[in-house]
Image: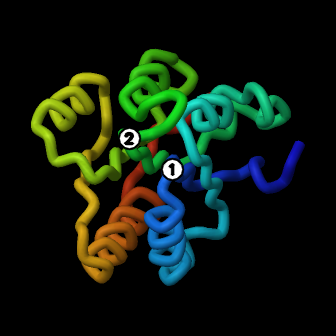
Amino acid sequence: MNEDTKEVEILLVEDNPTDAELCIRALKKNNLANKLVWVKDGAEALDFLFATGPFADRDVSCPPKVVLLDLRLPKVDGMEVLRKVKADERTRPIPVVVLTSSKEDRDVAESYKLGVNSYISKPVEFDAFAKTVSELGLYWLLVNRPPVTTR
């Protein structure tokens, strides 16, 4: 098994390299990016979460502590990723935080209908974006208490 994908705390699903780098930098500043995997489209996210394709050797029983999910993604959009994650009993307990530029009410409503744990619109200003990512990383990794999984 690839050690990089064995104990993942954060799965970042983001196609924009600039936004991904800002996220990673903000998380590193708080020592929260040591076990982060960045995937660049929805198909790659599903491969990771369900241990298929290039991630077939990953242990699906060791899910990330949180998924940071953009909605506007190539190949498979974020709503479809969310739909598949929350429809499968193996992945349903994984907290999914939508982190997107969309502020559309229908996207917010649909995300919550599908079971998203939090919906955050990306702040445009760099410092606000970095602060938001840092706070959500601290919350989901250090404050939140996830359900106990039985193997």
Q: Residue at x 28, y 60 (%)?
A: 122
Q: Which residue is mark 2?
A: 72
Identify which amino acid the numbered label 2 is placed on: Arg
Q: Quadrant of residue 73?
A: top left
Q: Residue at x 77, y 28 (%)?
A: 53
In which quadrant is the N terminus drawn?
top right
In the picture, the disc for residue 40 is none
x then y, percent, for residue 146: 45, 44
x then y, percent, for residue 38: 61, 54
Q: Residue at x 25, y 46 (%)?
A: 119
Query: Would you say 109 lies left or right of 13 here?
Result: left
Instruction: Please say if the residues under marks 2 and 1 sit with CB atoms less than 8 Å apart.
Output: yes
* Image label count: 2
x then y, percent, for residue 140: 41, 57
Q: Which residue is mark 1?
A: 15
Q: Is residue 27 above or below residue 52?
A: below
Viewer-side residue, 63 vs 4? 4
x then y, percent, for residue 149: 57, 33
Circle 1 sits in a helix, a strand or a loop, which is it? loop
Q: Residues within 10 Å of mark 1 (few under 14, many from 20)?
A: some
Identify which amino acid the numbered label 1 is placed on: Asp
Viewer-side residue, 64 vs 18? 18
